[in-house]
């Protein structure tokens, strides 16, 4: 039985106009993210992965096409889109973007305070294995720990969708695995629909589906019969 | 032409920072224009007066006396250092001008039988000199002519020694002697109630029984002979002719006021520009330091490519040079224009035949030197830091700011605050020095607002103190010669007069130790109610039975206090020398008078009970009939209405002050705006990443604005009371340096002034907030997240 699509992009295009140069970042992409699945997006640099993720998460708007969340369009106003991000989407980026002046717990609380039905910051940090570092400032944490705080921050509000753009891009393999474990655990335990961009081919095997990008289009979709646990990934 | 890459970067940086650059340039411009304005107006005044004095032979020494024969000239010109003497007849007389209800006072100055006076020449502005064959033709002073609409051919009546005489205007003129034409006892020139009238000496001498005699002398001195060397001999020579103490140019009223004004401009040219340029230097430093910090990796790259330390420093120095040069040009232009305007305003107060407004190049050079210099000092630290960065270190991201669980943020407080507020507080506390300096910069602009606005308070206070509390009479009558005390009863019978008090004013020289000062000694009855004097604790002080009641300004000049002995040399009559103790000191902001008991004064002068002035309280309903009656009384020398004096004060000083205050306000607002705007822009560029992250996390633009502006608001909040305090301090400083021998500018800042300063400062923050808000709403969420910090 096909699970229902939580988020769905229809005929998305995105054109960047810089001066006289026109860049077609997306050339008509149809995509669906189903309830609870973990999708990995791969493809050459510049193929449009980040552009798509940003559009799906409401950070950017498509030049044409539309994004449906639970069957309804995202809305047109800035306020509606902010609302959507605030209530339903969690982001994780290659650079952790933590607020330097807040502790780990406070960075997470930043989100839980404005969320509808959040985990406690402590619970979210527990989930990513940082239950004992609540009072640490970002400068007192390693890169991998910072990234896990970022993940805790993204998932603490119990988002419907978690969007990750190269979350392990700046990390070594051992640390990367810890981060991926955290993501996989959240996906499994909270049932959060997760999309993850990576350049690391080995990560593909932990996904339910792999979307391969080329030149602004989805070139192919591969469904994995089984998901490999992050610990077992070969870097 | 090929532009070097670094210079291209410079141009791009300037363009990118144009808002901030303009704000800094405007602050520099404010300082420069105050400097140029004050210096050029000052130069215009001194150039104009120097040329005028020279061309129309302004005297070096002046003296008046009762009466001396004209043949005294030989003895006068034989005095050591004297080149030649000009002997005149000078009298005060009541004029009956149809246009004015009050009697008007005229100073009648004799003209030689033919030709121009040897000294103190008359500049004819229209008409001609009087015809020797028509004795009652006169030349009238230009301001007086303007005030009464007089021109050649017009006629008006004067009471010459009690006899009504029609005078006919032959010409309108000016003289270096009356650049500042102030009536005796007046605080301000008042062309409506006081005028200079030049009249042929024969007619004037005949009217006052001074044929073959003179009662006023001006001397021209030989070069190299200071007035002080001539005065004692002159005094001695004139003593037996009723001389009233000779004085040099420095004490000549018109010149004295003029040089006081020039002195004030000099103060203005020092203090305010110093504040503006100091703040500008501080701002450039701050902006640049942060800019360099943000650009440190690019600087590292440049150095890795082989650019030298010197060229990096030069690069940033150039940036600042461009900024301050833009500011300099704007400042020059507005300063020139303002200086011109201000000189025009002075031209209304000080009458010159020709105002020379030609600022010397040194005004521009000085302002350039000061503004560029301060900017360069401002940039020094930042540029040195940039130049000294080792490339490898520069290209690494800066060490992450270290946050600690400081005792400044107790857990309870932290728990009580919401996250955004917590971010604001941590941000401020993270760099306490920078937050402090930012607050200080903002406080400086608030302080400037306070000192700009407080002039009005000072003026109000001064007027209130002097005209309402101290001087309670409605009119003052001055006599040509001292009168017996029975005139008090006679004056009491005049229409509308409610109370009369006699006053005796004698010219005197006060001496204590090596300090001395020529000032009026005023005799006043012990029970006087129309002059109310108070001590520093606001308690009323009355004239003592014995000893002197001295104004605090005079006491300060002489360096004496209660109980000290003062030597008073009376310069009139029998020229007695008195040794009297200071019995009490009273507080005043206008004038330097000293009082003593009237009976006692008459006794020590060895004269009968006399008075030279009457103070009147008048029923306002009968003032018209009183004035009409006074116009007919011959023996009166002058009538001064208090209302006329206060009106005049309001009109001239008040209006000029209002315009000045407006300009200073504009400058201070520019500074407040520049300060706030720069701070917010810098905060935005430093924290753009963080704010973009918050937007990604789902914070609304309003919430993000709160975090950015909250910090600014907090710093402004700290700055406001600091600024008010600073304003008070600056006001005290300026009052101290602005003190002239006529005015002591009081510091009496009203609560409303602080309120307005605060409101205006907040108002100046609004456009900055709007401008930054616009940028904030266009924050590029994706772009920020793509790059590493
Ligand atoms: N702000 C922008 N202005 C102009 N062109 C842009 C902009 N952002 C992205 N592009 C272009 O759009 C295309 C897609 O970019 P996108 O960031 O989606 O690629 P990507 O697949 O995420 O690449 P990578 O794996 O390197 O992150 C690229 O050709 C890029 O140059
Ligand atoms: Mg990408």
Image (cartoon, helix red, strand yellow):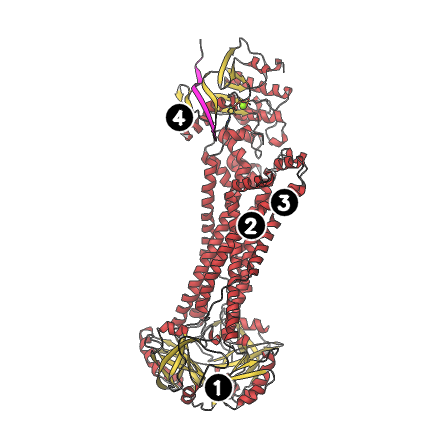
At horizontal 55% and vertical 17% (from top left) the residue drawn is A184
Instruction: Give the dominant element type of the magenta stretch: helix, strand or loop.
Output: strand
Residues at circles 3 and 2 in contact by the CB criterion of under 8 Å: no
Residue assigned mark 1: B215
- Quadrant of the drawing holding the N terminus of chain A: top left
Q: Quadrant of residue B581?
A: bottom right
Position of residue B527 measured from the top left corner of the image (x, y, whole percent): 45, 78
Q: Helix, strand or loop at disc 1?
A: strand
Q: Give the magenta part as a residue range.
A: A1-21
Q: What residue does disc 2 label?
A: B324
Q: Which residue is mark 3?
A: B314
Do the residues at discs 2 and 1 belong to one chain? yes
In this view, the residue in front, A194 or B240, is B240
Q: In this picture, is B259 found above or below A134?
A: below
The numbered mark at residue B644 is none
**For discs 4 and 3, the disc positioned in front in the rendered view:** 3
């Amino acid at each position: 039985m096909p699970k229902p699509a939580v988020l769905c992009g229809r005929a998305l295009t995105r054109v960047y106009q810089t001066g006289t140069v026109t860049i077609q970042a997306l050339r008509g992409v149809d995509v669906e993210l189903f309830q609870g699945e973990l999708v990995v997006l791969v493809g050459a640099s510049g193929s449009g992965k980040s552009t798509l993720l940003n559009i799906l998460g409401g950070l950017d708007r498509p030049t044409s096409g539309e994004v449906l969340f639970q069957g309804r369009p995202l809305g047109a106003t800035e306020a509606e889109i902010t609302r959507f991000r605030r209530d339903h989407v969690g982001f994780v980026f290659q650079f952790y973007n933590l607020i330097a002046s807040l502790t780990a717990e406070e960075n997470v609380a930043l989100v839980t305070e404005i969320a509808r039905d959040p985990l406690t910051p402590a619970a979210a940090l527990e989930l990513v294995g940082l239950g004992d570092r609540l009072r640490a400032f970002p400068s007192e944490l390693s890169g991998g720990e910072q990234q896990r705080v970022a993940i805790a921050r993204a998932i603490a509000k119990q988002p419907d969708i978690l969007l990750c753009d190269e979350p392990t891009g700046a990390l070594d393999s051992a640390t990367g695995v810890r981060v991926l474990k955290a993501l996989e655990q959240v996906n499994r335990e909270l049932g959060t629909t997760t999309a993850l961009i990576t350049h690391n081919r080995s990560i593909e095997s932990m996904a339910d589906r792999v979307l391969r990008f080329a030149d602004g289009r989805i070139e192919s979709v591969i469904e994995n019969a089984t998901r490999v646990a992050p610990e077992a990934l070969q870097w | 032409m090929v532009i070097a890459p670094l210079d291209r970067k410079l141009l791009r940086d300037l363009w990118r920072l144009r808002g901030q650059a303009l704000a800094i340039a405007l602050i520099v411009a404010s300082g420069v224009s105050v400097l140029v304005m004050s210096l050029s107006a000052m130069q215009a005044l001194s150039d104009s007066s120097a040329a005028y004095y020279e061309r129309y032979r302004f005297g070096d020494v002046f003296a008046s006396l009762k009466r001396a024969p004209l043949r005294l000239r030989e003895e006068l010109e034989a005095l050591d250092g004297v080149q030649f003497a000009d002997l005149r007849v000078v009298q005060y007389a009541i004029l009956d001008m149809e246009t004015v209800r009050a009697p008007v006072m005229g100073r009648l100055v004799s003209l030689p039988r033919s030709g121009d006076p040897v000294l103190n020449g008359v500049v004819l502005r229209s008409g001609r000199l009087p015809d020797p064959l028509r004795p009652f033709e006169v030349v009238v002073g230009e301001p007086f002519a303007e005030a009464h609409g007089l021109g050649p051919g017009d006629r008006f009546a004067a009471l010459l020694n009690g006899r009504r005489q029609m005078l006919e205007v032959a010409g309108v003129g000016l003289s270096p002697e009356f650049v500042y034409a102030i009536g005796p006892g007046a605080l301000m020139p008042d062309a409506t109630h006081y005028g200079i009238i030049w009249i042929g000496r024969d007619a004037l001498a005949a009217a006052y029984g001074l044929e073959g005699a003179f009662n006023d002398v001006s001397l021209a001195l030989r070069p190299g002979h200071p007035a002080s060397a001539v005065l004692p001999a002159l005094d001695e020579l004139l003593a037996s002719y009723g001389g009233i103490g000779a004085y040099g140019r420095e004490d000549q009223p018109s010149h004295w006021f003029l040089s006081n004004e020039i002195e004030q401009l000099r103060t203005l040219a020092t203090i305010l520009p110093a504040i503006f340029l100091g703040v500008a230097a501080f701002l450039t430093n701050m902006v640049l330091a942060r800019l360099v910090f943000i650009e440190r990796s690019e600087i590292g790259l440049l150095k890795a490519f082989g650019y030298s330390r010197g060229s990096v420093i030069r690069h940033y120095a150039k940036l600042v040079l461009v900024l301050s040069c833009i500011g300099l040009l704007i400042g020059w232009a507005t300063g020139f224009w303002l200086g011109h305007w201000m000189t025009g305003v002075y031209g209304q107060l000080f009458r010159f035949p020709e105002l020379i407004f030609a600022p010397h190049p040194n005004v521009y050079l000085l302002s350039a030197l000061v503004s560029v210099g301060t900017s360069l000092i401002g940039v020094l630290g930042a540029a040195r830091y940039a130049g000294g960065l080792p490339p490898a270190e520069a290209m690494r991201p800066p060490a992450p700011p270290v946050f600690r669980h400081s005792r400044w943020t107790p857990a309870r407080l932290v728990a009580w605050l919401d996250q955004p507020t917590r971010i604001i507080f941590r941000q401020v506390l993270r760099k306490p020095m920078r937050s402090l300096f930012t607050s200080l910069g903002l406080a400086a602009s608030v302080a400037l607002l306070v000192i700009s606005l407080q002039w009005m308070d000072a003026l109000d206070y001064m007027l209130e103190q002097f005209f309402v509390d101290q001087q309670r009479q409605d009119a003052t009558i001055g006599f040509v010669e001292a009168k017996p005390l029975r005139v008090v009863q006679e004056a009491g019978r005049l229409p509308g007069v409610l109370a009369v008090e006699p006053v005796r004013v004698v010219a005197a020289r006060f001496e204590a130790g090596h300090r001395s000062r020529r000032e009026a000694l005023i005799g006043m009855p012990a029970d006087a109610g129309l002059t109310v004097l108070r001590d520093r604790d606001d308690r009323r002080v009355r004239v003592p039975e014995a000893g002197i009641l001295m104004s605090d300004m005079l006491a300060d000049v002489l360096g004496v206090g209660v109980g000290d002995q003062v030597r008073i040399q009376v310069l009139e009559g029998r020229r007695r020398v008195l040794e009297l103790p200071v019995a009490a000191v009273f507080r005043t902001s206008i004038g330097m008078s000293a009082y003593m008991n009237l009976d006692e004064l008459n006794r020590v002068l060895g004269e009968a009970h006399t008075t030279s002035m009457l103070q009147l309280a008048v029923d306002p309903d009968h003032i018209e009939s009183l004035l009409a009656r006074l116009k007919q009384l011959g023996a009166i020398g002058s009538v001064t209405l208090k209302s006329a004096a206060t009106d005049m004060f309001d009109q001239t000083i008040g209006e000029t002050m209002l315009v000045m205050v407006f300009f200073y306000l504009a400058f201070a607002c520019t500074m407040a705006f520049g300060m706030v705007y720069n701070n917010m822009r810098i905060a935005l560029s430093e924290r753009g990443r963080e704010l973009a992250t918050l937007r990604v996390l789902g914070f609304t633009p309003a919430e993000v604005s709160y975090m950015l502006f909250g910090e600014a608001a907090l710093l402004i909040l700290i700055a406001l009371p600091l600024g008010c305090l600073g304003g008070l301090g600056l006001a005290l400083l300026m009052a101290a340096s602005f003190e002239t021998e006529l005015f002591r500018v009081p510091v009496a800042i009203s609560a409303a002034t602080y309120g307005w300063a605060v409101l205006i400062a907040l108002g100046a923050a609004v456009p900055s907030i709007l401008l930054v808000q616009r940028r904030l709403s266009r924050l590029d969420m994706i772009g920020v997240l793509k790059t590493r910090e």
